Image (cartoon, rainbow, N blue to C red):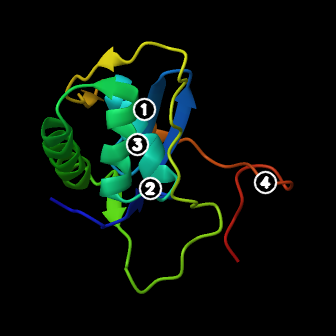
Amino acid sequence: MHNQTRFKINSPAVMLEKFDDEVVMVNLASGTYYSLGKSGAVICTAIASGATTTTITDALSRQFQGSPEAMEQAVSGFIDELLREQIVVPVDPSAPEEPEANGSVPAGDSQVVRRIFEVPVLEKYTDMQELFLLDPVHEVGDSGWPQRKA
């Protein structure tokens, strides 16, 4: 288990966007894109906010019904998968905390019945790799695109 380890999204190589209860990520280096729902979306959103693995597991136990031990194992295994896919990278423990990384995880709506916990699934898509690698998603600044390096 990664316990108090923090991870972060492997930016700028990986872009992450949250849509309602789904998280979509694109690895611009490989051209692979991913979709996450349910507990996987909660975990990735928490990683992006700077939460430790312990904080993530605690948040899952407040939002889902299930064994805390099973959730802990699922978080650890899921983070291992995200590391293999180079979606996340460990945060250097000596590095100062980034301002946008507050480490908090939404508790969920207390009025809603907690759903049954399901092990997170990383849905991986490679059907558009060639297109992403030919014309990767890019950030456009005030001067437009493409921007030539000095």
**Residue 145, position as x, y percentages in the image:** 74, 49
Mark 4 / mark 1, whichever is N-terminal = 1
Q: In the picture provided, is 140 more to the left or to the right than 44?
A: right
Local SS, label 3: helix
Q: Is residue 130 above or below residue 2?
A: above
Give the residue at mark 3: 44
Query: What is the three-letter code of the residue carrying label 1?
Result: Leu
Mark 1 / mark 3, whichever is N-terminal = 3
Mark 3 / mark 4, whichever is N-terminal = 3
**Residue appearing at x 34%, y 50% in the figure:** 87
Of labels 3 and 2, the one closer to you: 3
Give the residue at mark 1: 131
Q: Which quarter of the figure has residue 8?
A: bottom left
How dense is the environment of label 2, judged by Cα within 10 Å: few (below 14), some, or many (20 and up)? some
Give the residue at mark 4: 141
Query: What is the three-letter code of the residue carrying label 2?
Result: Ala
**Residue appearing at x 40%, y 28% in the figure:** 63
Front-most of residues 5 and 112? 112
Of labels 2 and 4, the one closer to you: 2
From mark 2 to mark 4, how far is it between C-alphas? 18 Å
Mark 2 / mark 4, whichever is N-terminal = 2
Q: Which quarter of the figure has residue 18?
A: top right
From mark 3 to mark 2, how far is it between C-alphas? 16 Å
Report if the CB atoms under discs 1 and 3 are less than 8 Å apart.
no
